[in-house]
Amino acid sequence: MSDSTFVVDGYVPPKGAPMNLATLTLTQGDYLRSMQIPLLEGRFFMESDAASAPLVAIVNRKFAEHYWHDATPIGKRFRIGTPESRTEWLTVVGEVADVKESSPDSPDKEEWYQPVEQFGKSLGSFGSDWDLNGNSGFITLRTAEPPEQMANSLRATVHSIDPQLPLSQLQTMRHAVSDSETPRRFQTTLISAFAAAAILLAVLGIYSLIAFSVALRVQEMAVRMALGSQRSGVLGLVFLSATKLGLAGCGLGLVGAAAASRLMDSLLFEVSPFDPIVLTLSAGFVMLLALAASLVPARRAASIDPMQALRAE
């Protein structure tokens, strides 16, 4: 994979726009099928797309939207180089979906694919013997067997082609995806740990405040019960205090979330910091925690013996 400049037939770039630049991926065989990259329109490469055949290319969705907008890219042409270059035109024969190369939250980029057999011809007089070499590349293998069992077969096949050709970083796609998500997984674990600590502190804080409030209002509650108030009414008073604390905490939390929206946006994947469903569920969870933290003080308040409390006064 490498970035390449090109000229699109009939496309007039805006004034001051930089050169057209997109990622070029040279393929051989059924690379796109083996990677299960969805075909949106047109066709994949075929064996007939050889060095002597007309030059063809497959573009991704972002590439097509940039240069042809809502029109079909099939049949459109572009060529490698600058407007002054005298390279041959490549015809678009297929459009595929955008793919993520490094991590799930990496931005989509413009990309096009070309058969490796046609690369030298597409460079024309600008090409050289060093444009294609065996210093790097990827081999993709899709199998119905467990991937780990195919490692030796793959090594043997490559060795039969060139005994001096090494294979490095041999791994399954599951491991490749897992490795790409390692930084995100670490961030998620760290944030989850801080969130758990914050929840614990919030529960302890609410419990302490409600318990202290109940201790101060023992005489008041004893009088209420002596005058005929039911224990359910006492429970309601305690839960009402917890609800007020929870609402205040939710309000402060929403203000804090708005203030930290830019920071949170860089840590979230396909979720907005102001997603109403997420904020509603978070607020509801905080309210449930407030009520759960007040349960023990509320039961203690409801079990007060009015006579003993008034005698203690």
Image (cartoon, rainbow, N blue to C red):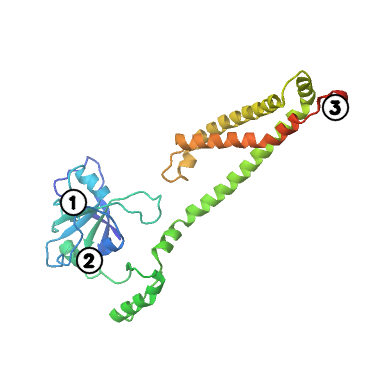
Where is residue 263? Give x, y as percent: 49, 41
Q: Are marks 2 and 3 in contact (CB under 8 Å)?
A: no
User: Of circles 1 and 2, which is in front?
Assistant: 2
| Residue drawn at 31 percent across, 50 percent down | 109
Q: Which residue is under mark 2?
A: 116
**Circle 2 SS class:** helix
First in sequence: mark 3 or mark 1?
A: 1
User: Of circles 2 and 3, which is in front?
Assistant: 3
Q: Residues within 10 Å of mark 2 (few under 14, many from 20)?
A: some
Up-down relation of residue 241 to residue 179 (above or below): above
**Distance from the alpha carbon under mark 3 to that under mark 1:** 92 Å
Q: Which residue is under mark 1?
A: 7
First in sequence: mark 1 or mark 2?
A: 1
User: Of circles 3 and 1, which is in front?
Assistant: 3
Specify the quadrant of the image occupied by residue 181. Answer: bottom left
Residue positioned most to the top: 227
Q: Which residue is under mark 3?
A: 308
Q: Residues within 10 Å of mark 3 (few under 14, many from 20)?
A: few
**Circle 3 SS class:** helix
Left or right side of 279 for 112: left
- Residue type, label 1: Val
Where is residue 306? Give x, y as percent: 81, 25
Q: Examine the rendering and report whether any part of residue 256 can be seen.
A: no
